[in-house]
Image (cartoon, rainbow, N blue to C red):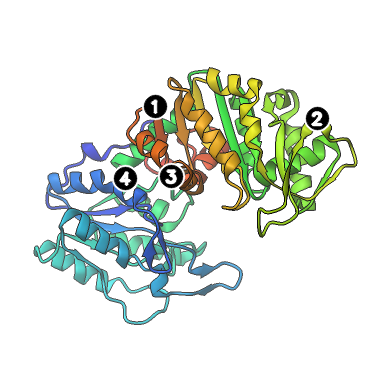
């Protein structure tokens, strides 16, 4: 049986511990939400407790343009706000290696100098620049291996606590091959809860929405075979309705229709597990919500042409069959914002309220947008849910969907790199 190598089993005394976090919470130089940072603090405190010397790193944004091969390195994608937050939160002194120019990082000498200060007690932790500022982070050539070797040469142990960073990059996979490596406390916790999706108390109700079908078709094709019931939302649901009922919805691309056909064909006998929300919101514009109407699936006939469908109608979640479905569920997995923009949030709000009415189910929420919408639409309910053991909020939605597509909580390549052989 697969088992993660555990940081609790490592002797950290006097060791330089290189820790990959998922602190991708900075936008235009400011922290959007501290949830992902706060979730990793237990790992950091454990390193201190065991006498380790923490060197932290995370990616922020997408400074590397894969199409042009160019780096756009600016203060807007800096990790400095994260360092400053940790200093204030924990009353510790952090140190950031100094790089004067804005070119991709190859030279690790400034990092080595910062670690020297850490060993001398001049600071409490070091926080590296954005890992995506490094030449080899997302590279497919020798520069990736060179980066891994260079950073590994400065540390004794590697800890991966970045569940949300599921891509097989240098800082998540490459370094793990160069050093004794283990999973951080958050990584272990998240993988444990993800296992409850693969081995759920049934019935398992899954709700997934998205703006593009192509990014979800793989996970959805796996999830429909895993869940007892699957509810779709967003453009994914719109494309599904177009194919299933022979209607047209404005804004649904031909590519989305192709993907929807593939999904329905792949679902085969499992298609009966798809639960259709009976009412949707049609709008004349995506720019405002002044001209909208409720449309019922029962009234749609082949050839019907709709304007933009931008939300699930709240009335859907007042339907007796939908209420029963949510009420009977023992595990609810949610990676979904039902509305297209912040102007259309009533369907999402109604769904979250219905989920909260089920007091016995384990409720698993994944994805930054999903959690952010919950927090903004129902702040009081969210505050209670955050301290309720029947709820769990994952720090990475993409990571969960990748694992589901791979068919295992241990399917992600960064996690595989930490498995005991």
Secondary structure beneath dot 4 equals: helix
- Reading the image, the residue beneath label 2 is 298
Residue 420 at least partly seen: no
Q: CA distance from mark 1 to mark 2?
A: 35 Å
Q: Which residue is mark 1?
A: 390
How crowded is the residue under tag 2: few (<14 C-alpha within 10 Å), some, or many (20+)?
A: few
- Residue in the image at 66% along x and 38% along y: 313
The crowd level at tag 1 (other Cα within 10 Å; few <14, some 14-19, many 20+) is some
As drawn, is 1 to the left or to the right of 330?
left
Q: Which residue lies at the image location 26% right of the left edge and 62% below the top edge?
A: 83
Judged from the image, the secondary structure of the residue bearing numbered disc 2 is helix
Q: Could you tell whether 325 is left or right of 147 in the image?
A: right
Question: Where is mark 3, residue-wise?
Answer: 375
Q: Residue furthest bottom?
A: 101
Distance, label 1 to label 4, CA atoms, is: 17 Å
For the residues labelled 4 and 2, the Cα–Cα distance comes to 45 Å
């Amino acid at each position: 049986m697969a088992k993660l190598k555990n940081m609790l089993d490592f002797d950290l005394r006097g060791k330089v511990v290189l820790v990959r976090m998922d602190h991708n919470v900075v936008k235009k130089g400011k922290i959007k939400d501290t949830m992902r940072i706060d979730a990793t603090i237990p790992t950091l405190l454990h390193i201190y407790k065991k006498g380790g010397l923490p060197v932290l790193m995370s990616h922020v944004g997408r400074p590397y343009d894969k199409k042009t091969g160019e780096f756009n390195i600016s203060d807007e994608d800096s990790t400095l706000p994260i360092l400053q937050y940790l200093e204030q939160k924990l009353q510790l002194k952090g140190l950031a290696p100094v790089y004067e120019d804005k070119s991709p990082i190859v030279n690790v000498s400034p990092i080595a100098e910062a670690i020297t200060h850490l060993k001398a007690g001049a600071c409490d932790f070091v926080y590296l620049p954005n890992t995506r500022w490094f030449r080899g982070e997302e590279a497919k050539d020798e520069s990736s291996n060179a980066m891994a070797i260079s950073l590994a040469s400065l540390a004794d142990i590697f800890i991966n606590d970045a569940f949300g960073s599921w891509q097989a990059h240098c800082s998540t996979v490459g370094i793990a091959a160069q050093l004794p490596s283990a999973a951080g406390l958050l990584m272990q916790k998240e993988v444990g809860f993800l296992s409850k999706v693969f081995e759920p108390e049934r019935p398992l109700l899954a709700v997934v929405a998205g703006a593009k079908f192509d990014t979800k078709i793989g996970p959805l094709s796996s999830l429909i075979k895993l869940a007892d019931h699957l509810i779709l939302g967003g453009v994914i649901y719109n494309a599904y309705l177009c194919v299933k009922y022979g209607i047209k919805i404005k804004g649904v691309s031909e590519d989305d229709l192709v993907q929807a056909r593939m999904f329905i064909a792949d679902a085969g006998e499992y298609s009966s597990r798809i639960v259709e929300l009976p009412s949707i919101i049609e709008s004349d514009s995506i720019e405002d919500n002044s001209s909208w109407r409720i449309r019922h699936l029962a009234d749609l006939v082949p050839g019907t042409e709709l304007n933009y469908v931008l939300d699930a109608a709240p009335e859907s979640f007042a339907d007796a069959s939908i209420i029963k479905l949510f009420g009977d569920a023992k595990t609810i997995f949610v990676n979904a914002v039902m509305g297209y923009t912040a102007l259309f949030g009533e369907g999402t709000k109604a769904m979250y309220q219905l989920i909260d009415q089920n007091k016995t189910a384990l409720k698993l929420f994944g994805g930054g947008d999903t959690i952010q919408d919950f927090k903004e639409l129902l702040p009081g309910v969210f505050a209670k849910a955050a301290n309720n053991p029947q709820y769990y909020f994952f720090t990475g939605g993409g990571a969960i969907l990748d694992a589901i597509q791979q068919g295992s909580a241990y399917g992600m390549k960064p996690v595989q790199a930490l498995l005991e052989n």
